[in-house]
Image (cartoon, helix red, strand yellow):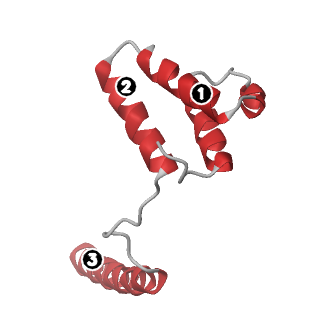
Amino acid sequence: MGDAIEDATLYNCTAMLLLQMDSDTNVNSVWMLNRSQVLDLLDATLTEVETSAKRTVLRDFISECLFPSQRPYDLAWWQKLVWTVVFAAMLVVATGGNAIVMWIVLV
């Protein structure tokens, strides 16, 4: 990890990782550490994890926290709105059609 990461982001991500590992951890002490101590804390925290699967999950979490990326499959708000309206209309038509069929069969 280079100096490209802002200190606030590094400290916040480290605190969130510590909270994810143990919710009773006091993360206020993270802000009293310098940058190299925070990096050593991250390394020690990730190496003390007992299973490799959990270690991989935590490494993915810290990577996504430190280097957030735009997901290519994340739609813009207006595209989500269009799909929501289309789906709502489809749901109303399907519900209405099924209600008419049930009304005809039962009556």
Helix, strand or loop at mark 3: helix
Q: Which quadrant would residue 33 be assigned to in this image?
A: top right
Helix, strand or loop at mark 1: helix
Residue 55, labelled with which disc? 2
Residue 61 lies left or right of residue 51; in this view the side is right
Residue pictured at 51% horizontal, 20% vertical:
45
Residue 71 lies left or right of residue 22; in this view the side is left
Residue pictured at 27% horizontal, 83% vertical:
97
Amino acid type of the residue tagged 3 in the rendering:
Asn
Count of picture labels = 3
Is there any visible trace of residue 99 in the rendered image?
yes
Q: Which quadrant would residue 95 be assigned to in this image?
A: bottom left
Please state the horizontal and vertical placement of residue 72, each as a whole percent of the image. Answer: 32, 70
Question: Marks 3 and 1, how far apart in space?
Answer: 52 Å
Mark 3 or 1, nearer chain start:
1
Mark 3 or 2, nearer chain start:
2
Q: Residues within 10 Å of mark 1 (few under 14, many from 20)?
A: many
- The residue beneath circle 3 is 98
Q: Residues within 10 Å of mark 3 (few under 14, many from 20)?
A: few
Residue pictured at 64% horizontal, 25% vertical:
23
Residue 45 versus residue 6 in the image, above or below: above
Amino acid type of the residue tagged 2 in the rendering:
Arg
Q: Nearer the viewer, mark 3 or mark 1?
A: 1
- The residue beneath circle 1 is 18
63 and 83: which is toward the camera = 63
Amino acid type of the residue tagged 1 in the rendering:
Leu
Residue 46, labelled with which disc? none
Question: Marks 3 and 2, how far apart in space?
Answer: 50 Å
Q: Nearer the viewer, mark 3 or mark 2?
A: 2
